[in-house]
Image (cartoon, rainbow, N blue to C red):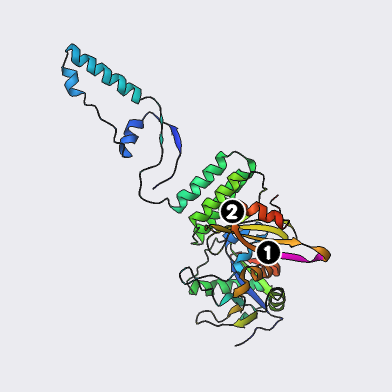
C-alpha cells in the first residue's frame, strides 16, 4: 500500500448537478452504497495530481479528462462539471475530526493516477462534510 | 396508474381528442333518425340532440391519459413538480422550479438518475412550508434531492429527501468558543421542524 505524500494533491470530479452557484454538494465525497447488497464502497475515487508531472493543475485537467474518456466516463465537451482540488494533509486532518482516513494509490489499467480515500465507512456523511470544507479550488473540466 | 390531475376546459376538438384518448361514451347514430319523420321519432331525435348538445358544452377533462397502467416517468414527475411549484405562485417556488429544471437538464447531460420518490418528498415539503427561504438545491450521487440553508461558515442545515419514510437532516450549528456540532439525523419529514428546532437549526 502506497500512501500519498501529505504535501501532494488530489482531484475529485464533481458533476454539474452537484454544484449550485459557489456551493459544492458535500455528498460528492460520500462513499456510495450498493443498492442491492447495502455494502458501502471501500474508498472514494480520486486522482493524484503530482503523478502527471505538470507545473499547473490546469495542465493536468485535460489529461485527466482523457483518462475518464478511456474509462468510459466521458465528460461531454460542453460539460460544466468541475474538478475539486484538495491537499492530502488537509483532507486527512479534516476527516480526523471524526475518524482517521488513509489516502492511498490504487492504480488501474487505464488510470494510473487513481487513488482512494479509505477508512470512513462508519462516518460517511460526517467525513464527506469535512472533506468538502477543505476544497482548495474548483477547475472546470472543459474550460 | 397515472396520477396526473391536470384539468382544463375542453377545446373545440374535444370530441375527437376524447375518442383518441380511450373515451368510451355512448355514440349516437343519426342515420335512422334522419329518415324517419314520425312524431315519436322526432321527439326522440330532439331529446338525443339536446343531450348531445349538453355533452358538447365545455367541461373539465383529463389532459393526460388517466387510465394507464404505466407508472409516471421521471420526466413526467419533474414536469408535474415544476408545474405545481409554478402554480403555487410564490417567488420562492418559482425559483425552486427553475432550479429543478436546470438540475434535471444537468442530470440528463451526465446520465444521472433522479429518484422519483425523492422528487415527491421535495415537492410536498416546499408546498407545505411556504415560510422557508430559498435553499441551495443539488442532486446527491444516489440520485436524491438535497437542499441546504447556509447561514454562515460552518453554520448550515440540510435536508436530503431520501424518498424513504425517513429523510436525512444534516446540520452544523455553532456552539461556544467557536466550536461547532455536526448532526446527521434520520427522521420523518413531518417532524423535521421540531427536530431542527431542538438543535437550533433554522430553515430561514
Which quadrant of the structure image shows residue A85? bottom right
The residue located at (26%, 31%) in the rendering is B26
Q: Is residue A140 visible?
A: no
Give the camera-side residue of A49 and B163: B163
Mark 1: give few (<14), some (14-19) or many (20+) Cα within 10 Å.
Answer: some
- Quadrant placement of the C terminus of chain A: bottom right
The residue tagged 2 is B189
User: Which residue is found at the position 58% from the left and 39% from the top?
Assistant: B88
Q: Is residue A37 left or right of residue B34?
A: right
Q: Position of residue A23 (x, y in %)?
A: 67, 60
Relative vertical location of residue B75 with respect to residue B177 in this rendering, above or below: above
Residue B143 highlighted magenta (yes or no): no
Host chain of mark 2: B
For this view, does B83 lie left or right of residue B73? right
Report which residue position mark 1 lands on. Answer: B183
The reply to whether the magenta stretch includes residue B182 is: yes
* Numbered disc 2: secondary structure: helix
Q: Nearer the viewer, residue B107 or A133?
A: A133
- View extreme (top): residue: B39
Q: What crowding class fits label 2: few (fewer than 14 Cα within 10 Å), some (14-19), or many (20 or more)? A: many
Q: Could you tell me residue A132's position as x and y percent?
A: 67, 67
Gap between marks 1 and 2 measured at Cα: 16 Å
Task: Give the quarter of the image for residue B42.
Answer: top left
- A52 relative to B39 in the view: left or right: right
Measuring 27% from the left and 18% from the top, which residue is drawn there?
Answer: B47
| Quadrant of image for the N terminus of chain A | bottom right
Provide the residue span drawn in magenta.
Answer: B178-183
Secondary structure beneath label 1? strand
Amino acid at each position: 500500500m502506497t500512501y500519498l505524500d501529505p504535501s501532494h494533491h488530489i482531484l475529485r470530479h464533481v458533476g454539474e448537478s452537484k454544484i449550485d452557484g459557489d456551493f459544492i454538494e458535500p455528498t460528492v465525497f460520500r462513499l456510495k452504497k450498493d443498492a442491492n447488497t447495502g455494502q458501502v464502497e471501500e474508498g472514494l475515487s480520486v486522482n493524484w495530481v503530482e503523478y502527471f508531472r505538470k507545473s499547473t493543475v490546469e495542465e493536468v485537467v485535460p489529461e485527466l479528462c482523457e483518462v475518464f474518456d478511456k474509462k468510459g466516463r466521458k465528460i461531454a465537451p460542453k460539460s460544466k462539471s468541475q474538478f475539486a482540488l484538495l491537499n492530502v494533509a488537509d483532507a486527512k486532518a479534516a476527516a480526523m475530526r471524526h475518524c482517521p482516513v488513509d489516502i492511498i494509490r490504487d492504480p488501474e489499467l487505464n488510470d494510473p493516477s487513481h487513488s482512494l480515500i479509505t477508512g470512513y465507512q462508519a462516518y460517511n456523511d460526517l467525513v464527506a462534510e469535512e472533506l468538502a470544507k477543505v476544497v482548495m479550488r474548483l477547475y472546470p473540466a472543459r474550460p | 396508474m397515472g396520477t396526473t390531475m391536470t384539468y382544463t376546459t375542453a377545446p373545440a376538438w374535444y370530441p375527437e381528442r376524447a375518442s383518441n384518448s380511450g373515451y368510451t361514451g355512448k355514440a349516437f347514430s343519426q342515420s335512422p333518425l334522419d329518415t324517419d319523420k314520425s312524431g315519436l321519432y322526432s321527439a326522440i331525435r330532439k331529446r338525443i340532440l339536446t343531450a348531445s348538445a349538453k355533452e358538447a358544452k365545455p367541461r373539465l377533462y383529463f389532459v393526460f391519459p388517466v387510465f394507464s397502467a404505466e407508472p409516471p416517468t421521471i420526466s413526467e414527475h419533474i414536469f408535474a413538480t415544476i408545474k405545481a411549484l409554478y402554480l403555487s405562485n410564490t417567488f420562492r417556488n418559482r425559483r425552486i422550479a427553475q432550479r429543478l429544471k436546470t438540475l434535471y437538464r444537468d442530470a440528463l447531460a451526465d446520465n444521472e438518475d433522479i429518484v422519483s420518490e425523492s422528487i415527491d418528498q421535495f415537492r410536498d415539503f416546499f408546498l407545505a412550508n411556504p415560510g422557508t427561504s430559498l435553499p441551495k438545491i443539488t442532486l446527491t450521487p444516489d440520485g436524491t434531492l438535497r437542499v441546504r440553508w447556509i447561514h454562515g461558515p460552518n453554520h448550515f442545515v440540510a435536508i436530503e429527501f431520501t424518498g424513504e419514510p425517513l429523510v436525512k437532516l444534516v446540520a452544523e450549528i455553532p456552539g461556544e468558543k467557536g466550536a461547532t456540532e455536526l448532526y446527521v439525523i434520520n427522521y420523518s419529514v413531518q417532524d423535521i421542524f421540531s427536530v431542527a428546532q431542538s438543535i437550533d437549526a433554522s430553515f430561514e
